[in-house]
C-alpha cells in the first residue's frame, strides 16, 4: 500500500519536472506584439464609452472592433470626430441559425452529484438529457451530448467537447439540492458574478471538480468582465426558465419560479456559445423528489427544455430550426 | 548504534494539512496544532504594530484587521493561480516543521495528509506548492492517513468531516483509488454558513462574524433533542442581547445527516456483497465534525434500514491524521524516501 502511495507521488512529480526556461522565440515575440497591439486597439476604442461608467458593457466590447483614431484626432470627451459611439451589433443581423445543441448531463462516473432518497443526480440528469436529445433530434436539431453514459468527466472536458463540436448553444442539466427542505422550484443560470451566498455555495460545489475555486473565478470575471455572449445567454436562459416553469407548474402547482440568475459556473465560463445551466428540480424537497422518480415528470422536464431551445431559436429571429428555417436562414 | 545515529540524523513528520486546523506529529515526540490561517501585515503601519513579517493560526486570526489573511485550503481545495495561497500553504508547512524543532542538519522526511478532494483535483499544484519545505516529502489523502494510523486498512470506511469537505474512503486493503473515495462540501463551513443565515433571518439586526458562529458551533453543536438551551450574546443595534439559537443550531448540524447518510450507503453498496456487513460495522468518524454529539448514533440509526452498523468517532480527532501520516513516514522504506524530493 505504501509502495502505491509512493508511486502515486512519483507519478505526480513526473508530471511536474521543472522544464528549462526557454528563451522566448521570435515567433512568440511577434505573437505577444500582435496581442499587445490588439489590446491597445481595444483599450483605445473602449476608453471613450466606458470612462466614468465603471465596468465596460458588452455592447462596448462588440463595438471595440472599430479601430481607434490617433489621440490627437479625439475630442475632449474622447469621442473621435465623425464617428458615432460604438454600438452593439445585434446578432440577429447575421441570421445565425441554432442548429447544434450541446446537452451536458451534470456530474457522472465517480461524481454522483446530489444524492438523496436513494436517487443520484448523475442518473437523473443523464436520463433527462437523453430525453431532451430525443425530442430535439425529432425537431431536426443536431444534438451532441457531453456524456452518453455513466462517465467521469472534468468540467474542462465538457467545455472542450462543447467548443470543439462547434455547438450553437450549450445546455447543462442539473438537479438542485437546497439546505431548506421545503424550498422547491426551477432555476436557470447564466454566467456572471454573484454575491448571493446560496448561489456562491452552489457554484462552489458544482465547480469543485474543476481545480479552480470560486474566488479565482470572481477575480477572472471581474478582470475580463465583458462577455459578448451575455445578452444571448440571458435570452436563452429566459426562454428555458419560462418554458420549464410554465410546463412543470401544471403538474406541480406549488413549484417556485426561482428565476434566471447569474453564477460563475466553470461550464459557463469556458464555453464559447450562449450557455445556460438549469436546475430542473430540487431533490432535497420531498415532493419534487417523488415527482423526479416518475418517467412522465422527467419527460415533461425534457420537453420543456427542448421547447426552451425552440423558443430561443425562433423568437430571437436567429433563424429557426433546420426543419423550420425559411429562405432567409443560413 | 546505527539506529541511534538514524534517529538523530532524520526527523520523520506527519502533517495533517486541514482546511480549518493543521496538526503535526514528529518522531521526536513533538505534537502541535495550529489554525490554518496565515496572515501578512497589510502595510508598514500594521507591520510595526504586529512586529512580525507573518503570523499563523489563532494569532493571525486575532490580528486579522491588520493582516492580509489567508486560509489556503478553503472548501478543501488549494486555490490555483493564487500566489498568495500557494505561499500560504508553503509557509504554513514550514511553520509546522519549525514547531517540531529539527536540529541543524537533521534530515526532515514529511508525509502531508491533505483533503481528498484537494489531492484528486490539484495534486500537481499542491506538490508544487510544498516544494522545498522538507528534504523529502510525500502527499497522501487525509482519510488514507487516518486509516493507516488506526491500522484500519481492510473493510473499513473512514468519514472525515472537516471544515471545507467531508471525505469518505472505503479501505479495501489497497491504496484507495478515486472510486473508493467521495467528497462532499457539506462540512463544518457549510454548517457555519447555514447557522449564520438562519440567525440573520430571525434577528436581522444581530451583529456577528462567521468566526463567532464557528466558535458557537464548536462549543454547542448537537444532533437530536437538545439537552439545554443554546444562548449566545451578540450586539443587536449596538446593545448586547441574548439570543436563543437552539433550533438553528440543531437544524444546521442536522443538515449534514442526509448527504452523509446517502453517500455512506452509496459507497457501501459498491463494496462486494460479502464484505458489506463488515464495512457497515467498521465506520470510523474523523475530523472536527466527528465531535458533534449524537452524530454517530444518528448515522447508526440510518444504517438500521440496511441491516445495521457501527459508527465510532475517533478519540483524538486533532492528531489522528498527523499520527497516521507519521506512521506512514516511519514505515516507508529509506529507498522510497530517496526517490521523493522535498
Image: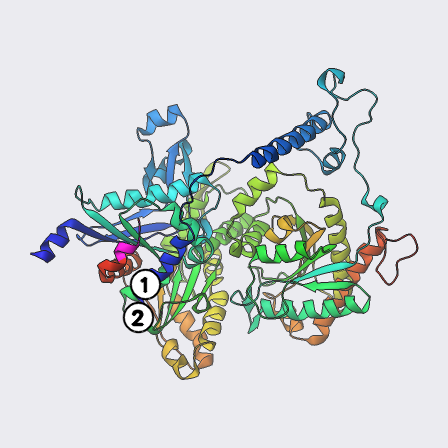
Q: Are marks 2 and 1 in contact (CB under 8 Å)?
A: yes
- State the mark number for residue B146: 1
Q: Is residue B195 magenta?
A: no
Q: Is residue B341 left or right of residue A165?
A: left
- State the mark number for residue A129: none
Q: Is residue B266 left or right of residue A13?
A: right
The residue at the point 69 percent across, 33 percent down is A56
Q: Is residue B338 magenta?
A: yes
Residue B240, picture quadrant = top left
Secondary structure mostly seen in magenta is helix
Q: Position of residue A261 (x, y in %)?
A: 67, 50
Range of residues picked out in magenta: B337-341
Disc 2 target residue: B152
The residue at the point 48 percent across, 35 percent down is A23
Of callouts 2 and 1, which one flags the residue occurring earlier in the amino acid sequence? 1
Chain of residue at mark 2: B
Residue A250, visible in the rendered structure: no
Amino acid at each position: 500500500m505504501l509502495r502505491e502511495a509512493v508511486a502515486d507521488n512519483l507519478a505526480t512529480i513526473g508530471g511536474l519536472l521543472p522544464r528549462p526556461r526557454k528563451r522566448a522565440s521570435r515567433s512568440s515575440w511577434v505573437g505577444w506584439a500582435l496581442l499587445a497591439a490588439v489590446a491597445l486597439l481595444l483599450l483605445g476604442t473602449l476608453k471613450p464609452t466606458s470612462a466614468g461608467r465603471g465596468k465596460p458593457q458588452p455592447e462596448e466590447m462588440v463595438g471595440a472592433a472599430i479601430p481607434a483614431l490617433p489621440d490627437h484626432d479625439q475630442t475632449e470627451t474622447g469621442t473621435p470626430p465623425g464617428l458615432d459611439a460604438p454600438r452593439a451589433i445585434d446578432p440577429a443581423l447575421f441570421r445565425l441559425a441554432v442548429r447544434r445543441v450541446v446537452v451536458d448531463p451534470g456530474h457522472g462516473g465517480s461524481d454522483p452529484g446530489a444524492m438523496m432518497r436513494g436517487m443520484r443526480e448523475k442518473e437523473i440528469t443523464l436520463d433527462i438529457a437523453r430525453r431532451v436529445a430525443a425530442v430535439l433530434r425529432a425537431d431536426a436539431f443536431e444534438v451532441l451530448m457531453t456524456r452518453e453514459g455513466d462517465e467521469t468527466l472534468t468540467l474542462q472536458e465538457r467545455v472542450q467537447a462543447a467548443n470543439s463540436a462547434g455547438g450553437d448553444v450549450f445546455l447543462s442539466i442539473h438537479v438542485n439540492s437546497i439546505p431548506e427542505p421545503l424550498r422547491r422550484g426551477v432555476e436557470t443560470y447564466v454566467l456572471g458574478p454573484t454575491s448571493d451566498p446560496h448561489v456562491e455555495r452552489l457554484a462552489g460545489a458544482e465547480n469543485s471538480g474543476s481545480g479552480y475555486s470560486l474566488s479565482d473565478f470572481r477575480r477572472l470575471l471581474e478582470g475580463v468582465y465583458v462577455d459578448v455572449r451575455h445578452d444571448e445567454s440571458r435570452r436563452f436562459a429566459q426562454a428555458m426558465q419560462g418554458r420549464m416553469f410554465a410546463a412543470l407548474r401544471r403538474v406541480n402547482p406549488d413549484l417556485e419560479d426561482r428565476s434566471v440568475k447569474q453564477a460563475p459556473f466553470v461550464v459557463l465560463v469556458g464555453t464559447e456559445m450562449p450557455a445556460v445551466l438549469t436546475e430542473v428540480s430540487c431533490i432535497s424537497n420531498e415532493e419534487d423528489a417523488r415527482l423526479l422518480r416518475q418517467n412522465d415528470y422527467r419527460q415533461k422536464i425534457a420537453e420543456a427544455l427542448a421547447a426552451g431551445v425552440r423558443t430561443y431559436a425562433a423568437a430571437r429571429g436567429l433563424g429557426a430550426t433546420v426543419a423550420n428555417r425559411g429562405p432567409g436562414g443560413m | 548504534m546505527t539506529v541511534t545515529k538514524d534517529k538523530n540524523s532524520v526527523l520523520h513528520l506527519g502533517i495533517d494539512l486541514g482546511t480549518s486546523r493543521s496538526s503535526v506529529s514528529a518522531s521526536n515526540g513533538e505534537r502541535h496544532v495550529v489554525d490554518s490561517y496565515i496572515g501578512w501585515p497589510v502595510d508598514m503601519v500594521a507591520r510595526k504594530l504586529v512586529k512580525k513579517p507573518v503570523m499563523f493560526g489563532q494569532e493571525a486570526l486575532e490580528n486579522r484587521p491588520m493582516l492580509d489573511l489567508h486560509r489556503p485550503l478553503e472548501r478543501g481545495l488549494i486555490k490555483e493561480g493564487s500566489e498568495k495561497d500557494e505561499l500560504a500553504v508553503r509557509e504554513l508547512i514550514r511553520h509546522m516543521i519549525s514547531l517540531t524543532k529539527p536540529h541543524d542538519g537533521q534530515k526532515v522526511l514529511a508525509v502531508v495528509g491533505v483533503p481528498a478532494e484537494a489531492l484528486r483535483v490539484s495534486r500537481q499544484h499542491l506538490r508544487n506548492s510544498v516544494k522545498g519545505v522538507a528534504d523529502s516529502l510525500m502527499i497522501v489523502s487525509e482519510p488514507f492517513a487516518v486509516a493507516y494510523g488506526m491500522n484500519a486498512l481492510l473493510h473499513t470506511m473512514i468519514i472525515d468531516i472537516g471544515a471545507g469537505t467531508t471525505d469518505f474512503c472505503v479501505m479495501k486493503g489497497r491504496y484507495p483509488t478515486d472510486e473508493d473515495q467521495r467528497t462532499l462540501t457539506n462540512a463544518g463551513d457549510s454548517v457555519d454558513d447555514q447557522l449564520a443565515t438562519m440567525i440573520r433571518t430571525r434577528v436581522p439586526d444581530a451583529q456577528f462574524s462567521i468566526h463567532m458562529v464557528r466558535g458557537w458551533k464548536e462549543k454547542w453543536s448537537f444532533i437530536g433533542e437538545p439537552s439545554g438551551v443554546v444562548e449566545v450574546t451578540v450586539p443587536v443595534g449596538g446593545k448586547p442581547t441574548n439570543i436563543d439559537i437552539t433550533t438553528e443550531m440543531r437544524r444546521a448540524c442536522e443538515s449534514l445527516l442526509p448527504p452523509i447518510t446517502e453517500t455512506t450507503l452509496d459507497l457501501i453498496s459498491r463494496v462486494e456483497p460479502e464484505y458489506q456487513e463488515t464495512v457497515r460495522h467498521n465506520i470510523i468518524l474523523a475530523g472536527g465534525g466527528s465531535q458533534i454529539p449524537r452524530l454517530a448514533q444518528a448515522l447508526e440509526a440510518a444504517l438500521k434500514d440496511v441491516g445495521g452498523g457501527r459508527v465510532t468517532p475517533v478519540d483524538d480527532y486533532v492528531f489522528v491524521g498527523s499520527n497516521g501520516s507519521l506512521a506512514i513516514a516511519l514505515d516507508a522504506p529509506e529507498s522510497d524516501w530517496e526517490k521523493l524530493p522535498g
